[in-house]
Amino acid sequence: MKIDLKHANDIVKTIADELAKNEDFISDLDQKIGDGDHGYNIVRGFKAVLEIDSTNLSLDNYFMQIGRTLMAKVGGASGPLYGMSFMKAAAAFKNSEYIDFKNFKEFVANFAKNLQILGKVQLNEKTMYDVWNPFYTKLSEFNEINLEAKNELLEYLQYLVAQTKDMMATKGRASYLKERSIGTIDPGSFSTGIILKNFLKEL
């Protein structure tokens, strides 16, 4: 399925709602290995995103505005990471009226690349890069999306989020805990899973 601007707005509302429902859980994860504010911050950010007037925006400009809004409203380390990555990844939708499987893959690739550059991260460091990068690799195995592929990708996405539980953090505040960071899902990876899942389900 192709996702037009109105449909993208609807997906973002679904994401905002699901993040809000999981705010306490995300905050609990972050209290264990971080500042404890990622749940509140990401929910506040996506509430602000819902206020964007997309009436006269192109698809890529809408995603640019999402990035700018998250930059302004989401505190902590995740604000700049999410914000700048959305802004950079928006180029995937330039000159397009729809999100399709091809430019969605490009969006995920751009997002992952920017995370690596901005966050100076590698794989297995217990960050949301551990979801974005391997998820793009998995997406690249498919030339088109169908129900079977979608279910496989959704299952893999769930696995990627869950596997951060077994990693030791080497970036950010969680890195100070060293081995004690093992056993908790990375909160940014959990919020990433919600975002990617809801777009993928509609393709």
Image (cartoon, grey):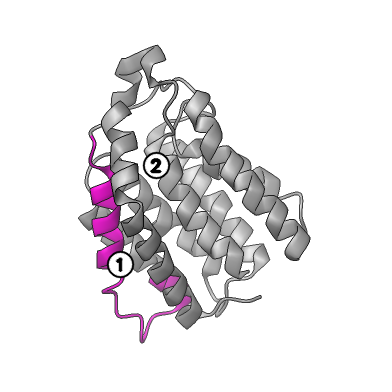
Task: Pinpoint residue 137: horizontal percent, then vertical percent.
Answer: 67, 43
Count of number-bearing discs: 2
Residue 70 picture quarter: bottom left
- Whether residue 88 sits left or right of residue 97 in the image: it is left
* Residue occupying image coordinates x 44% and y 24%: 183
Q: Residue furthest top?
A: 179
Q: Which mark is residue 188?
A: 2
* Residue occupying image coordinates x 22% and y 46%: 75
- Identify the secondary structure beneath mark 2: helix
Q: Is 101 placed above or below 83 here?
A: below
* Residue occupying image coordinates x 27% and y 62%: 69
The residue labelled by disc 1 is 49
* Residue occupying image coordinates x 34% and y 43%: 26
Q: Nearer the viewer, residue 40 or 127?
A: 40
- Identify the secondary structure beneath mark 1: helix
The three-letter amino acid code for the residue at tag 2 is Gly
Whether residue 165 is visible:
yes
User: Is 37 inside the magenta-drawn segment?
Assistant: yes
- Give the distance between the C-alpha atoms of the residues marked 2 and 1, in whole angstroms: 18 Å
Task: Pinpoint residue 161: horizontal percent, then vertical percent.
Answer: 52, 40
